[in-house]
Structure formats: structure tokens, C-alpha cells
Amino acid sequence: MGISIELEINGASVSKEVEPRLLLAYFLREELGLTGTKIGCDTSQCGSCTILLDGQAVKSCTVLAVQADGGSVTTIEGLANGEYHPMQQAFWDNHGLQCGYCTPGMIISCIDLLNTNPQPSEEEIRHGLEGNLCRCTGYHNIVRAVQAAAETMNG
Amino acid sequence: MAGANNTNGAQGVFGSSIRRREDPELITGQAKYTDDLQLSGMVYCTILRSPYAHARIRSIDASQAEALDGVLGVFTAKDIEESGIPGAIPVGWLLPDMKIPEHYMLVKDTTRYVGDGVAIVVAEDQYTAHDALELIWVDYDPLDGVADPHKATVEGAPLVHEEAPGNIAFDWEIGDQEKTDAAFANAAHIASLDIVNNRLIPNAMEPRAALADYNSITGELILYMTTQNPHIHRLLMSLASLGLPEHKIRVIAPEVGGGFGSKIHHYADEALSAWASMQVGRPVKWTATRTETYLTDAHGRDHVTHGELALDAEGRFIGLRVDTYAAMGAYLSTFAPAVPTYLYGTLMSGEYDLPAIYCHVYGVFTHTVPVDAYRGAGRPEATFVVERLVDEAARVSGIDPAEIRRRNFIAPDNFPYATQVALEYDSGNYAGTLDKALATIGYDDFRKEQAAARERGQHLGIGLSAYIEACGLAPSAVVGSLGAQAGQWESAVVRVHATGKVTVYSGCSGHGQGHETTFAQIVASALGVPYEDIDVIEGDSGVMPHGWGTYGSRSAATGGSAIASAAQKVVDKARTIAAHLLEASEEDLAFEDGQFFVKGSPDQTQSLPDVALQAYLAHNLPKGIEPALEATSFYDPANFVFPFGTHIAIVEICSRTGHVTLQRYLAVDDVGNVINPMIVDGQVHGGIAQGVGQSLYETAVYDESANLLSGTMLDYAVPKAHFLPSFETDRTVTPCPHNPLGVKGVGEAGTIASPAAVVNAVVDALSPFGVTHIDMPVTPEKVWNAMHS
Ligand code: FES
Ligand code: FES
């Protein structure tokens, strides 16, 4: 039995019938083909699935699609707007990614981090990324990327 | 969008930190990983896994599952057997007298670890496929299990396989026992340690997945999967599992989200997906949940070791003796037998001139997930044993840890150096990285600060790890003589198109290492063609010649060398054509920046694209020269490559909580010539993070009945950003003398060096408490107990 939902995704309005148990992460990936949002765990630990819901970073594997009804979602696919978002650019410039699997969620979390704290210290960056795991980079260059993006976005 | 890299064409491309060309797709979410792919008519596979470490299956009743709407079928080992395929999951490295128990794609009657596959469901959607698992009723008769590799060998321990008494899979040794015992008899000092090398779960962020598409009309199977080595998977799928002819299988690695070894191995799950597609006649997708990756991705390490180092009165090492119980888990995984033997025992000389070594290893079956190569594979374990023993030797002899290392290093003029454990080190300057590291960290000042801090009741420690790594396993004939059922060469095709643009095919298969960037850098330098004009393609067994993939830090040294030699063949052929066109003799031609010209008269040139066009038109080629301009190389290295370095950790320990803070971490590595410094630093960072993870946070925990207690990311501590400091990196450059690029490997260096550096630092900090060793992970609880016992 489907429930209809209507929401805005990357600036476009979407209405669909969904099963009540469908998670937002799967809704984005399977129903809308927005596979940039990744799934890396089943215990809400990894943060690969992080998206912006009404401007706030949330793990889309912890939200039901029906809970996002009426909301506005930004995924990694919706960040670049003719130009890369400064955070995307900073990840590229600073080698903030290797395999790229954590990257969509990581970039979204980093944007959220700077939204709430535009000039974080290294320690604040590291603690701010508590919800996102990266197995490749050792976080070193992710921290550099956030510092660089903070500079661009404040400058 | 911010434009492409500005690289100034081919000039200075080799050795520069070009931003990665892989990244635009990755930072925009456009890259497609296996689970991102959809095929029309696709259905889903899920796998029922044993909840018991050891149990006999009395019966399986799948009728309720089969009756569920949307279920296309439930299959067990019996169905696979009846389909007539070989159905085996083979081991790819044979040791003398090794017990090789049957490993079938699904369990036939006995489960041997929690996670062993019992049945599969194929259903129209993944929810139904998961729901149906709950409706399969298996009547298990639980049996005793054992998880500890030492306890498993004790009399009376439950047997994993009847045919392996004492759970011994193999009994292996290297070195000279008699000579080593004699050295110990004459020792002035002996350092002795009992060491547990903790079991690790790889945790590539992308879970394993497969999408199999079998065409019953053509008999062709296309298998998209999370693989580090598509050709190895094709070979084993064909020979051992599915029985399809090799040329009818095409294995494609889409974007792959990290591997660290876990995507080398041939598992049942991907073979089951392929078999399921053959049964239902539709594309079948299987994607592991994270819990499944914990229960099935081959784990790493899991050694119990006793090691001893003998010294003479001057503090020189005269003998090393090591006895290890290495877990194999429930079955022999693809390259598992090589890991605690030829990738471990052979590294026991470390960076040291050691005249006598003996290493004995039992490979042990336990009721656990199979153990196989995980980043470093054997070499981190060996380095940990050697470098912990060296620190203990410093303690028992009263010599400073830096000084005792320097005193025992193989001297720079002593290369090539034949160790007592079968390797011939090609080059090295070990004191070079040690001195640089000590100077950068301020070793002498730190010792003063440490003494002052101790007065204040503050516990600081410094730990050195002077490591060597043997990577780029080679040559194939030698590796074969040691038991490998695989070659260790690598393939490359360099194809110059008629317009001078270039496509490069490599048999390596990157999954985060940035090969498309670095391999293009190699070719740009070799051909003098703009970097932007070169594409690199990997990871599709239907497109490139056979290759062996990416693991063991082999891609630059072996794959890069294959590319360099294919490029050289292209230049050689182009030179012949250019000489013909310039009406000169080949010997008189110079080749610079992509231009051929007669030496001394650079005005008249033939560029590589000019030559390529002529090569394709073939209107005016020299006699005996075939049209087109491309070359293939199958490069078999002359030897391993031997990166080395010194890593230093500084820790502070909280005396109230036992918490360890990693204050500084410095890596001074020598990986030979560097193609892209930014990427090399990134590899070092990631490697250190995994090694620090092992030393401070990570461990797979089994209970007495062999249940995996650390079965989710909640219970297994993959390091988070705030667990780690920023890393300091530096280098010396000692080029590899035997490959065309002078490169070594870098993928595993950080993981190999760091556990010993961190634990040595912790033990140093705790030395006032009389602590001489502490096992990993060094948790606050262990530290606190060590301080208070
Ligand atoms: S998928 Fe891991 S937190 Fe959502
Ligand atoms: S880049 Fe691979 S997990 Fe972060």
C-alpha cells in the first residue's frame, strides 16, 4: 500500500507513491536514480548516506521517505550549480578523497559543518565529522579541504 | 565548472602533484559503483548465513519462503550440485603438505563459521529477498567451536575439518634453525616477547556487491563486481566455481570503493549471484549489508607469536627466532597461505644485518571468517614482531632505541643484500630515513622534555619503527616455485590513435589509488604527448589483455613498469617510421618533447602525432613495418621492490584513565621515484590511519564459542577523524635499480610501519611502570591495568 509524498529534490518538485517502510536513502537511489548518495552500513554509523534535508545534514538511512514529505532535499548531485560548490572544489584541490565512496556524504557533512561554524579549528573540524567514516584518506586531506573551503566561503 | 588540469602538456608531468582526473565524477556523485547499476529485468539475491560457528544441518525447509509473493526461487548446495557446475571456492597458493578442505559455494552439511552461506533467495525486489530469508527454516545441530588460533591446536579442541588434525592447515618454516639456536647459545642479551597480532576487519567503505547478467542464448556472463582484480576473478569463476569457458565470462570492475585486500579474494557470494542469474535467466544483483561484510569479507592478521632476538655484548643482533600460530579461519581463502609465510617469514630480517634467522609458522583452522591479505598482508605482522623485539633489545641491553637500530642497519654499500630468509634487497639507505626522522621530530630534545614531564607526573613516550616492505611480488617463476597459482607480471597496451591521442589499457584495477592520473603521467613523460591527450582504462576483462590486478603495492612498480615498457616500444617503432620519413638513419635521430629530429638540426621534425597518422595511413612505411602505432607489454619484474623508512610516534598517556593520545606522527618513507607526490602522501596518510586503527582502536572479537561479538560498526572501531592527528610526511629517494621507472610501492607502507611505532611509543611512556609489552589495540583499560599491576 503506497503513501503519496511530495517533496523538493535538488530544486525540482517530486511526487511519488512510496511504501511506508521505504528509507529515504533507498527512495533517492532506487526510485529517483540519485545514486550519488551511498549506503555504507546498516547501523547509521558511516555517514555515506548524508544529505541535506531542509538545509540540515541528516543520514538518509535513518529517515523514512514519508518523513521527508513536504521537505526540501539536497543531494550531492544538486550541489554544483554551473560551478562546483566550494566544498567540492576544495576536496578536489586538496586530494580529500581516494575511492570516493564516503565523499558525497562527507562533502555534505562538511558543508553543514561550515554552515554552523564558518571558521572551525582543526579540532572542531575533526569532531564535527564524527558521523562520517572514511577508510582511505586518514582524514588528513579532508581536514585540509574543509580549511580551504572555509577560506573561500568566508573570503 | 572549474576547468581541466593545467599541466603544461607533457613537460614535467612525471613527479608533479597533478590533481586527480578521477575526482570530478566522484565529487559530483556521478561515478557508478556496482550497487548503483540497474539492468532491465534485474532481480535480487540474498544469502542465508549460519548463525552458529559450528553446526550440522539436519534439514532445510524453504517452502514458506518459496511461497512468498515475488520470490523466484530458494536454492541450497543440493541445487548447485544438481546443476553440474564445479561449485568450488579454491585456494590459490599451495604450500607443501597443506591440508586443503573442500570449500563449496554453499554449505553442504556442516557450517564452520558464523556467516557461512546456507541458502540463497532470488526475488523481484530486495525487500522481498530479505523478508524471505526469515522464512527459511533450518534445523541446526550446534557443535563446539574454537576461535583462538593457539587454543585451536591444543589437544581436544573442536576440529574445523576432520582431515586436519590439531586444526593444523600447514606447518611451515624458513631460515636455519641450527645456526639460529647456536647464535642464541652465545648471546650476551636476549629480548623475548609474546605478541598477539589482533584480528582486523578491512572495512572498505563500499560493501561488496555483484551484478550478474547471464545470456543463455550466447552463453555469456557479464559480471559487474567489486573487485581489485577482474581477471583473477574471471579465471577462478571459470575454473573452479561456474565451469563456464573463460572467454564467455566478462568481469567488469565499475567504480570500486576501496578494497585494502578484501576485494582481491574469490568469495562464494559473487559466484552465487552469477549462478543465480544462470538459473532464473535474469540479471541478478547481490549487495552485502555492512553486517554481511563483517561476516564474510576476509579478515586480517590474527597471529599469536613468541619472538626472540639475540644480541652480542656490543648490542649487535646475532639471531632472531620466531614461532607463530596464524589463523586461517574456517577455509583457505584465495591467497591466505602466502600471507603468514612468504609475506611474513621472509620479512624477518627487517632493515637489519641479521646473520641467523629461524621462523616457524603453523597455519591454523578456526571457526571464524577466513583470514587473508589485508593492507600490508604479513608484512605488518613481521614488522611488528621485529620492531617490538628491537625496542625490547634496546631495553635489555641498555642501548638507546635509535642507536641500536643504527648499529644494526644493513649499510648502504652492502646492497644487493641477501637476507637469511630468501630475499635479496636491491637498494636502501636506512640510516638516511632514520636520521631525517630523528632530526624532524627533535629526538634529543624530546628525550629531555620526556624526562622533565616525568618529573611532573606526565607520561610521554616516543616510538620508532624502521620498516622494510617487500612489494610488487616477483618474478613469476620464483613466486610460482613458492606455491603461487598465479603469475605476477602485469600487462599494458599503449595505443596511439591516428590523431596522436592515446589510450592506455592496464591490467591493474584501481579502487581509489588514482591510476588514471598517475598512469597518464607516466605515458605523457614517455611519449612527450600532452597529459590531457591520454586516457587510461582499467578493470574490464573484456577489454584489456590479462592482468593480475591491484594489490600488494604492485600497481606502480609492476603495472607502471609495464606501461613504461609498452610506451618505449611505441617510441621505438615511431622512431623507425620517423627516420624513414626524415630520410635519416635511426641512430641519428633525437626524440625530445614528442618530436623526432636529426640530432643537430631541430628545424625539421616529425612529431609523434605526425608519425601516428602516417602509421595508420600506411601509405609510406619502411619495409617490414606493420601499420598502426601501438604496443603491448607483459612485464615480469626481475625482483620485488623494497620501500623502507622510519616512522615515529609520540604519545601522551593519561595516568588517571589510561587514555592514549597520539600527539605527533611522522613518516619518512623512501618509495623510490615519485610519480605524483600528492597521491603518494595520500596513500601514506591512509595507511597510517589503518595502522593506528589497529594499534589503538580496532579488533575483531570472538567469544569462546566463536561468535563474532564485534559484528557491526557499532562494535568495531573504525577510526573517526577526531581519533587521529594530522600526519607529518617526508621522503628520501633511493630509486629502484631494476625497473624502468625507479619506483617502488607505497600503498601499504603506512600500515606496515605504524603499529610498531605507536606501541613502541606507548611502552616507552609506560617504562617507569615496568611495562615491557602491551597488546593491540592499546585500549585505556589495558593501559590502566598495565600501570596498576
Ligand atoms: S548508510 Fe551508513 S549511516 Fe547511513
Ligand atoms: S575516500 Fe574511500 S572511504 Fe573516503
Image: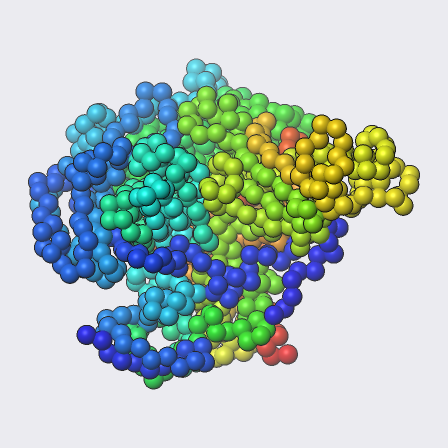
Residue at 48%, 79% in the rendered image: A116
Task: Classify B2 as above or below B493.
Answer: below
Task: Classify A31 as above or below B559.
Answer: below
Q: Is residue B648 visible?
A: no
Residue that lies at the very extreme toward the bottom in this rendered image: A70
Residue that lies at the very extreme toward the front in this rendered image: B619
Choose top left, top right, bottom left or bottom right for residue A147: bottom right
Q: Position of residue B278 (x, y in %)?
A: 28, 44
- Classify residue B425 as left or right of residue A37: right
Towards the viewer: B387 or B784:
B387
Residue at 40%, 54% in the rendered image: B34
Residue at 67%, 49% in the rendered image: B501
Q: Position of residue B754 (x, y in %)?
A: 49, 46
Residue at 54%, 27% in the rendered image: B475
State the colouring used for the structure image. rainbow
Choose top left, top right, bottom left or bottom right for residue B417: top right
**How many callouts does the rendering have?**
0
Q: Quadrant of the N terminus of chain B?
A: bottom right
- Classify residue B168 as left or right of residue B663: left
Towards the viewer: B34 or B496:
B496
- Classify residue B425 as left or right of residue B269: right
Task: Classify B679 as above or below A53.
Answer: above
Q: Position of residue B356 (x, y in %)?
A: 50, 21
Towards the viewer: B338 or B425:
B338
Q: Position of residue A92 (x, y in %)?
A: 58, 63
Q: Is residue B476 visible?
A: yes
- Classify residue B353 as left or right of residue B594: left
